[in-house]
Each structure stands twice: as structure tokens, then as C-alpha cells.
Image (cartoon, rainbow, N blue to C red):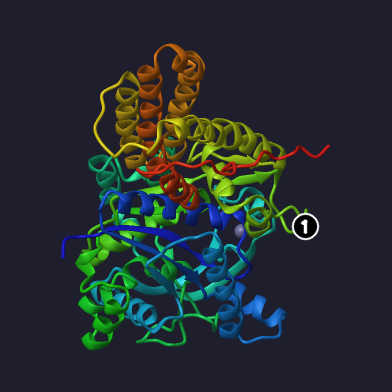
């Protein structure tokens, strides 16, 4: 088997139900996967859930459930949402899966044997919500910058991962792999963080019962972050290479269409939110270096969404439920909006006003009208033409967009991809306005017909480009534009009335 393109979402922490932020990352992976598949590439798309740690214990207790029962229920909500959002993943890893837990335990023993994990004592300031120790630079005045809550002082016996040992190796790695840290504007931040000095990382807890026990010292459970990062490798079948029970791991891999770890590893893209950039860009590659396993090719950290200009929060009650938006306006417009509105990587604001504006301008007017106008004019010229190569000025432009799409998608510039496609859609609408095929037909029927044929061919390309973003729309466009008899259809995107 040749290596598949391996793309991952973070595994989502099941202390709460999914919202637009989780959907954003997962949709981005779905779009990239669909794009790759549409070009005949083999893709392995992993998502999943992060299920251990003190916050899960607490959430379960509050709900009067066992941690596992709590996790099961939130996992169902995730899977249900991914179905609604038409996300086609190949594997869903849970950190409570046996394949994951055994791999994590084995990695831990390997690193103890190598001396990269050692037993010591730790005392420091700790954020219970992040489940992370923070120093003065990370949490000025002892307040967690993410949770805005004071840190508590914690002292415990703990195992440490020798992160400090990998400081120079990481810096060399970033330098010789300039495509690892993404987007580019984040790379200086990470590099400076590493340069400022890495400390060894406490990677076990004695106070947290809901975690993976250290095999050789089970009063310790493994720090939830250390456990979670390993999911990318445990799902890919690292267990087959390092654990005893080969048959078990072989069977697990078979279930997701793989034969070996090397079928997918190294991962091509870990797509994440910017709040977990350090874990993925610093700790994870260091862990892999310690294990002697190749590092992933790319980590891409996208920005955060605010809602109507405010940070999304339970207290403000402004959490956007993607299911509600999809139910009311359709799934494709939502998938489109999230990647058209904001440069992928930067922060963005979700407002219903801008959603409706985008919908009406880009979908109802630009794309929907273009398709209707073209097909309505095509009716009088009989069957739609067969697929073929044409060299009109419009199709030369389309070929350039093809190249631009390829370039932007390879850089995960999802917004630029849509921008390039919509710029051609604009050209096509202007082409109709300028050539006026309905008037032209009165004097030069053949020329008018050529304009329509031109548009049909270019629209078929548009259908291919938009399909990863808007699967139902792409498929419907392909159907309407198929060679053969042509008909009139209802608008693809009926205009939305702006509620006053
Ligand atoms: Zn925190």
C-alpha cells in the first residue's frame, strides 16, 4: 500500500457538548479530505474524543453518572453532529479505546526505560480547567489567561518527560522543516517560546483516578495531555509495532482499512485550534523524537470564532449551535460561510447579519443566478454539450483558477480557494452581461451558442471546485450540467429575506 494522506482533527474534550468551534476544525478536515479524494488521492481522516482527566470526572459527577457513561453520551452527540454536517471521517478514536490505552502505556514504559521519563517531585501553580501547570509568563498574576480563574498551588510526586533535552533538536527541526509550523505568522511565537527555555514536563497525576495508569507504577495516572497527543499514533496502529498483542492491533487496523502504521504515518496534517498550538508544535514532536518516530509534516493552528463580536461562552448564552443554523438555512451555506468569511488561520466573527449577506451575495446572486441564467439560455440550443477541452478566453481563465485552487489547497488556504473560484464566477456573470447572448442570438446564433457552451464548461469546473466545501451543491450542479437534455430548475439558493 502506498502511504495515504493522513489528516487529523484534535480529539475533542468531552467535558461539554460540541459547538461551532469544534465543527469548524472538523469541517476544514472534511473539506481537505474531500478535495484530495476528488483528485484520486487516498486519504485517511481521523477524528475522535479526549476522555480522561479531572474535568471529565467532575462533569460526570455533576450529571450523576460514571465517567464512562458520561463520555459515551457526549461521544454520541459528536457522532450525531458529524453526521448532520456530512463529515466523512475514516476513523473515530476514543482515548478510552483499548487500542489507545495499551499504546499509551507501552510508550510510557519505553520512555522510562530510555530515561526520557523519570520520577521526581513537582510543585507549581496549576489551572484545574486546563489541567496544566502554568508559570508566571504563561499566567500573569496567577490567573489562567484562558479560563480567567486563579491558579492553585499543587505539590505531588510525578513522572517528568525530559522536554528540556529536546530544545535544540526542536529548533533545528523547525529550521530544516519550514512547512511544519502553520500558519506562518505563528511560527515566530513557537520558536521564541522554545528558545526561551523548555522545562521538563510533569506527565502523571496521583490525584486523578480517571486516567490511564502507569503500568509499572499504577498509583500514577498519565497526564491527560500526554495521553491525548498519542491518539494520532495509536489510531494509526503504532501499537502493532511496539505492543505484545500483534493480533489485536492487526484486527483493529483492519477495521479502518489499514494494514500497518506506515500506511499513514507520518501524519500529513494535524489541524488544530490555536489554543493547543504549543502542545502540538512543541511537546508532540519532542515525544516522537524521544520515541524515534518520524514527526508529522505539518501542524496548522486556526483562529477562534467570536459571535456577534463577543467571545463565545456559556454564561453569555451565545454559543452557536451548528445544527440549528444548518436546519434553518441549509448545511452547504454554513459550510461555505465559515471558510469564505474569514482567512483560514485568523480569528473570525460569526454574525447572522454577515451570514445572510454572504448567502444572498455569493450564493443566491453570484452562483445561483449564474447557473439559472446559463441553463435557461441553454434550453433553446438543445442538449448540453459533452465534456471536452476548449480554449476560449473564459476557459483559459478557468484553467488558471484550477492552478490557483491547487496551490491554495496545498497551503490549506481554504478562504483563498473560494476567493479564486468566486472571482471567476464574477467574470462569468460579467461575460453574460457584456456578450448579451439573448440579443446576440438575433444577429449571430452560432456566436451566442458558443457563449453558452463556454459557460457550461466553466460551470462544470465550478461544480468540482465547490463540491468539497458544499457537497450537496456540487453534486446538484453536476447533475444539472450533465451532457444531454437540459431543463429549467428551481433556484439553487432562494434569496433570504433580511429580518428587520
Ligand atoms: Zn485554564
Residue located beneath label 1 in the image: 315
- Between 428 and 325, the residue placed more toward the observer is 428
Quick check: 111 left or right of 219?
left
Q: Quadrant of residue 119?
A: bottom left
- Between 159 and 265, the residue placed more toward the observer is 265
Seen in the picture, residue 351 relative to 296 is either above or below; the reply is above
The residue positioned 37% from the left and 53% from the top of the image is: 34
The percent position of residue 63, horizontal first and vertical second, equals 71, 80
Q: Is mark 1 within 8 Å of ligand 1?
A: no
| SS type, badge 1 | loop
Asked if residue 195 shows in the view, the reply is: no
Quick check: 65 left or right of 26?
right
- Quadrant into which the N terminus falls: bottom left
Asked if residue 64 shows in the view, the reply is: yes
Q: Quadrant of ligand 1?
A: bottom right
- Quadrant into which the C terminus falls: top right
Amino acid at each position: 500500500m502506498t502511504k495515504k494522506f493522513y489528516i487529523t482533527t484534535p480529539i475533542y474534550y468531552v467535558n461539554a457538548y460540541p459547538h461551532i468551534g469544534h465543527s469548524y476544525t472538523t469541517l476544514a478536515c472534511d473539506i481537505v479530505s474531500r478535495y484530495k479524494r476528488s483528485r484520486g488521492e487516498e486519504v485517511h481522516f481521523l477524528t475522535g474524543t479526549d476522555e480522561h482527566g479531572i474535568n471529565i470526572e467532575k462533569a460526570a459527577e455533576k450529571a450523576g453518572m460514571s465517567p464512562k457513561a458520561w463520555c459515551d453520551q457526549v461521544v454520541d452527540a459528536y457522532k450525531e453532529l458529524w453526521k448532520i454536517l456530512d463529515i466523512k471521517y475514516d476513523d473515530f478514536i476514543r482515548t478510552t479505546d483499548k487500542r489507545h490505552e495499551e499504546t499509551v502505556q507501552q510508550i510510557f514504559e519505553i520512555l522510562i526505560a530510555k530515561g526520557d521519563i523519570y520520577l521526581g517531585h513537582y510543585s507549581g501553580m496549576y489551572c484545574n480547567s486546563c489541567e496544566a501547570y502554568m508559570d508566571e509568563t504563561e499566567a500573569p498574576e496567577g490567573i489562567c489567561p484562558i479560563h480567567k480563574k486563579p491558579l492553585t498551588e499543587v505539590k505531588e510526586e510525578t513522572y517528568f518527560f525530559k522536554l528540556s533535552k529536546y530544545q535544540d533538536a526542536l529548533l533545528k527541526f523547525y529550521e530544516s522543516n519550514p512547512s511544519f509550523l502553520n500558519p506562518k505568522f505563528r511560527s515566530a511565537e513557537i520558536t521564541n517560546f522554545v528558545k526561551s527555555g523548555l522545562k521538563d514536563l510533569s506527565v502523571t497525576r496521583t490525584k486523578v483516578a480517571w486516567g490511564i495508569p502507569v503500568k509499572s507504577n499504577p498509583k500514577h495516572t498519565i497526564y491527560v495531555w500526554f495521553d491525548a497527543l498519542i491518539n494520532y499514533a495509536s489510531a494509526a496502529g503504532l501499537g502493532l509495532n511496539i505492543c505484545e498483542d500483534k493480533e489485536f492491533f492487526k484486527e483493529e487496523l483492519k477495521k479502518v482499512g489499514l494494514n500497518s502504521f506506515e500506511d499513514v504515518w507520518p501524519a500529513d496534517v494535524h489541524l488544530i485550534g490555536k489554543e493547543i498550538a504549543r502542545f502540538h508544535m512543541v511537546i508532540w514532536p519532542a515525544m516522537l523524537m524521544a520515541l524515534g518516530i518520524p514527526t508529522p509534516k505539518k501542524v496548522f493552528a486556526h483562529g477562534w470564532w467570536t459571535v456577534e463580536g463577543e467571545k463565545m461562552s456559556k454564561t453569555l448564552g451565545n454559543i452557536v449551535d451548528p445544527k440549528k443554523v444548518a436546519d434553518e438555512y441549509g448545511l452547504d451555506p454554513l459550510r461555505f460561510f465559515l471558510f469564505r468569511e474569514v482567512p483560514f488561520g485568523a480569528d473570525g466573527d460569526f454574525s447572522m447579519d454577515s451570514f445572510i449577506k454572504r448567502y444572498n451575495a455569493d450564493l443566491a446572486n453570484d452562483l445561483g443566478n449564474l447557473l439559472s441564467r446559463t441553463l435557461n439560455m441553454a434550453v433553446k440550443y438543445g442538449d448540453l454539450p459533452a465534456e471536452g477541452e476548449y480554449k476560449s478566453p473564459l476557459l483559459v481563465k478557468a484553467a488558471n483558477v484550477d492552478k490557483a485552487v491547487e496551490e491554495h489547497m496545498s497551503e490549506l488556504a481554504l478562504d483563498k480557494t473560494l476567493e479564486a473560484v468566486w472571482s471567476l464566477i464574477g467574470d462569468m456573470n460579467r461575460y453574460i452581461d457584456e456578450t448579451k447572448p439573448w440579443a446576440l442570438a438575433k444577429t449571430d446564433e452560432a456566436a451566442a451558442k458558443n457563449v453558452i457552451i463556454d459557460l457550461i464548461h466553466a460551470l462544470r469546473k465550478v461544480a468540482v471546485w465547490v463540491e468539497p466545501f458544499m457537497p450537496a451543491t456540487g453534486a446538484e450542479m453536476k447533475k444539472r450540467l450533465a451532457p444531454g437534455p437540459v431543463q429549467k430548475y428551481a433556484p439553487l439558493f432562494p434569496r433570504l429575506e433580511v429580518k428587520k
